[in-house]
Image (tube, helix red, strand yellow):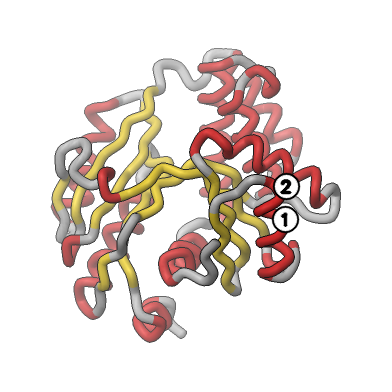
Amino acid sequence: MAGHSKWANIQHRKGAQDKKRAALFSRLSKELTIASKMGGPDPDGNPRLRLAIQNARGQSMPKDNIQRAIDKGQGGGGDDYVDIRYEGFGPGGVGIIVEASTDNKNRAATDIRTAFSKNGGNLGETGSVSFGFDQVGEIEYPPEAGSEDEIMEAAIMAGAQDVESDEGGHFIYTAREDLQTVADALAEHFGDAVEAKSTKLIWKPQNTVPIEGDAADTLMKLLDVLDDLDDVSNVYDNSELSDEEAARLAGE
């Protein structure tokens, strides 16, 4: 079981900075609607919707908002949405994976390609980047869930593969197929005391690429532009920043 990871810390720093609450709720609502449309409104029979509801609750989205988004999927919202993965390279050879849910593949492809080309990157072929990542489950708990040792013990008992903790929280990693089982076991362990902030499948890099200076500045701009696109659901990269560089980029 691993401990602190610079990569996890970088992801947290970016995540803390790149989501305004309104934008976050909009993205969560979109996923609820698409999941409801594709698999039905019953979370017990729709794993994607179940995860979407858990994530919405983890971000304190009001119950009425959650239900409206689900109902929208049953009323025709979320029509013809498809999930597409794009892969490319950013400044310094950093690998980037972009997941999109879109009702217009041409628009999504054009916007994503433009974001790469205008910010020091380029799109690659499918598989050109993802071979260096593992798709795993990630469950995030806030710092107040417990100490690093307490979380690690609970995670091991629940069947998790790995735990990484930093000042931003605890990140519990599972095999892809074990995500929901581990999430349910942890939810039972914590009860009403604390709720997971997010439960999702992610692309976790096998190795990281050190980056600094102007290349780091350009990379962060590229990641921000990608993340702000309406069609984009998630952005993953394998960059590694030193503590000093991360603090500089965070304006500390």
Can you give x and y, in whole percent of width and height, for residue 133 in the image? 33, 49
SS at mark 1 in the image = helix
Look at 45% across and 16% down and name the residue there.
Answer: 79
Question: In the rendered view, would you say 55 is above or below 104?
Answer: below
Label disc, if present, on residue 3 of the rendered structure: none
Question: In the rendered view, would you say 76 is above or below 100?
Answer: above
Can you give x and y, in whole percent of width and height, for residue 226 in the image? 32, 50
Decide which of 103, 14 is in the foreground and name it.
14
Q: Which residue is mark 1?
A: 154
The amino acid beneath tag 1 is Ala
Q: Which is nearer the N-term, disc 1 or disc 2?
A: 1
Decide which of 68, 163 is in the foreground and name it.
163
- Classify 10 Å Cα crowding around label 1: few (below 14), some (14-19), many (20 and above): some
Can you give x and y, in whole percent of width and height, for residue 241 in the image? 34, 74
Can you give x and y, in whole percent of width and height, for residue 228 in the image? 38, 50
Look at 19% across and 53% down and name the residue there.
Answer: 89
Q: Is residue 17 visible?
A: no
Residue placed furthest toward the right? 192
Label disc, if present, on residue 186 of the rendered structure: 2
Mark 1–mark 2 distance (CA, rounded to whole Å):
7 Å
Decide which of 223, 75 is in the foreground and name it.
223
Horizontally, is 124 left or right of 252 in the view? left
Q: Nearer the viewer, mark 1 or mark 2?
A: 1
Question: In the rendered view, would you say 106 is above or below 88?
Answer: above
Horizontally, is 156 left or right of 115 in the view? right
SS at mark 2 in the image = helix
- Classify 10 Å Cα crowding around label 2: few (below 14), some (14-19), many (20 and above): many
The amino acid beneath tag 2 is Leu
Q: Given contact means CB atoms under 8 Å apart, are the residues at marks 1 and 2 in contact?
A: yes
Look at 30% across and 64% down and name the residue there.
Answer: 208
